[in-house]
Image: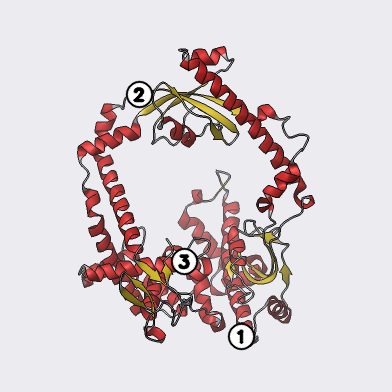
Amino acid sequence: MFAHIRKHQQWLFIVIIAVVIVSFVVFFTPSVGTGGGGGGGTGSNATIGTIGDQPVTQQEYYDTYKGVALQFFSATGSWPDQMGAQYGFDRDRQTSQRLVLLRKVKEMGIVTSDKTVADWKVNFFADQDTGTFQQEYYDRFLEAIKPRGLTEADLDRYAENQVGIGQLTSLVSLSGELVTPSEAERVYKERNQQATTMALLFSRTNHMSAGQDLAGMEEYFTNNMAVYRVEEKRKIRYVKFAATNYLAEAETQLNTSTNLQAMIDEIYTTRGTNSFTENGEVLAEDKAKEQIRNEELTSRGLEIAEEATRKFMSGFAKFEAYSSGALEQLATEMDLQSQVTTEFSRNQLAPGLGVPFSFTQTAYQLTEEEPIASPLEASEAFFVMALEEIIPDHPPTLDEVRTRVTGDFRREQQLIAAREQANTMHESLKAAMDGGKSFTDACKELGQTPIKIPNFSLTTRTLEDFQDRRATVSWLQNLAFAMSPGTLSDVSDTSDGAGLLYLKDYADVDEAKMNEELSDFLEELKQSRKSETFSAWIQQQMDSVRMNTDNSEEGSPASN
């Protein structure tokens, strides 16, 4: 079962293995207040907030959060308490917003039929290639949510609510459909008119002598100390169950269940002799079969490693408290080796392991209260991880970060010098142009050579045949489309210094191209307006929400 899950829904393994280790199950019940918010009632009937003048009970909040958690799990394959921080998840805001939507569904008399709910399920659990409902996906999803105390009834309610919210969204955003062809044409022209421009760019690399004496660096460091704060780092103790450790056992198993060589021959024939390549070259038969052999042994070795991981995890049942020490002790008892990583931050790969960033993400989900993670599959191995040490973040001394500060200070002084040059040139150009000179003549008089920029519009993403990275497309757009033809922009910072933009004129839109694209653009504009309409509406509704979920005495507005 686990091997099949790994091939189709890799994240389900981590969830389902929690069923084996009951002690690892963490229910997601939110820690809402039981008597705060100024409401009556006790326990699940306690009022913890209001929407408008209507009370919200703790039970209603909890039931709604189930839907929020399911939605997060459906989208990410993890639960809010596991990966919420990485996705910017806001429990109170998400739950409050769903409460608002569900109440509006009821208030507006929206009724979902059994057929629409069934259609939603078919679509949600459909094979991506064929579009047909997959009972296997459905059953495994139910298994995956069980450790969180969720049932098929919760999934049914979630499906019904999703359909209702979808219908509500369509109704609320209906006014966004009211876009006329003439309005679409006007917006199309605004977005697609081409700006003809020239630029003067002033780079810090022309001022490399600035800051070399380091005068003022200590003050610079003091003013920017927060930038140099040494971030938290962690050490992780781990046991690695690599597929390569089980290749001999894998070969024995494969030969026991089937003839390994016969299986290799069959795969070679079935997949086609040209399917096996290396560096774009088709492999000879013996090399291709060696490749198949390695793939099959590694695959079976990983399955055996999976079983060994599961057996190892079951050993934690005897410990009253989980810790890095418990993992080390268990590894010793089972004649396995545990190791400790060197320290790494939340933005770094674990050094020397050759593992993906998911290892780091998992490491930074661990806490002193929950120091052991569910097994992580990575790099043809399974890792069981425990929190070994947290090295807190701290403000550094200048000596700790002197090299970095020195480089940053010099760069800052060079940028300042480049921007001062740009300001001086701007004043001179303005004076010359105000005196009747053209932009190009003024530049020539001042010894400047402007850069001709390829035409661009508000929809331009890249400029072909323009390699100067100092002038980004967004920098050009922000300046050009706030100007009038024949004018010079103010000085604007760039990543490398500063620049000035001269807008010569706007080129007319290609009428033939517009007529060809206008129909599709009208539909895109309608969808965009509908989204804007709904966003404005839900923001207005959220202004009426007052929720107290932290046992404070006063309810406070839901975070927006």
Return the disc, 2 or 1, that comes first in the chain's sequence: 1
- Mark 2 or 3: in front is 2
Where residue 548 sits in the image (x, y, percent)? 43, 73
- Residue closest to the eye, 536 or 336: 536
Q: Amino acid at mark 2?
A: Ala
Q: Amino acid at mark 1?
A: Ala
Rendered image: mark on residue 317: 1
Where residue 260 sits in the image (x, y, percent)? 57, 66
Rendered image: mark on residue 430: none
Rendered image: mark on residue 77: 3
Where residue 399 sits in the image (x, y, percent)? 79, 50
User: Residue visible at 71% across and 62% down?
Assistant: 343
Q: CA distance from mark 1 to mark 3?
A: 26 Å
User: Residue visible at 59% across and 71% down?
Assistant: 375
Where residue 130 sits in the image (x, y, percent)? 33, 59
Q: Is residue 439 visible?
A: no
Q: CA distance from mark 2 to mark 1?
A: 73 Å
Residue beneath disc 2: 507
**Crowding at label 3, few (<14), some or many (≥20) Cα neighbours within 10 Å?**
some
User: Residue visible at 70% across and 58% down?
Assistant: 351
Q: 61 left or right of 212?
A: left
- Residue closest to the eye, 336 or 516: 516
Return the disc, 2 or 3, that comes first in the chain's sequence: 3
Q: How is the image coloured?
A: secondary structure
- Residue closest to the eye, 292 or 417: 417
**Crowding at label 1, few (<14), some or many (≥20) Cα neighbours within 10 Å?**
few
* Mark 2–mark 3 CB contact (< 8 Å): no
Element carrying mark 2: strand
Return the disc, 1 or 3, that comes first in the chain's sequence: 3
Q: CA distance from mark 2 to mark 3?
A: 49 Å
Element carrying mark 3: loop
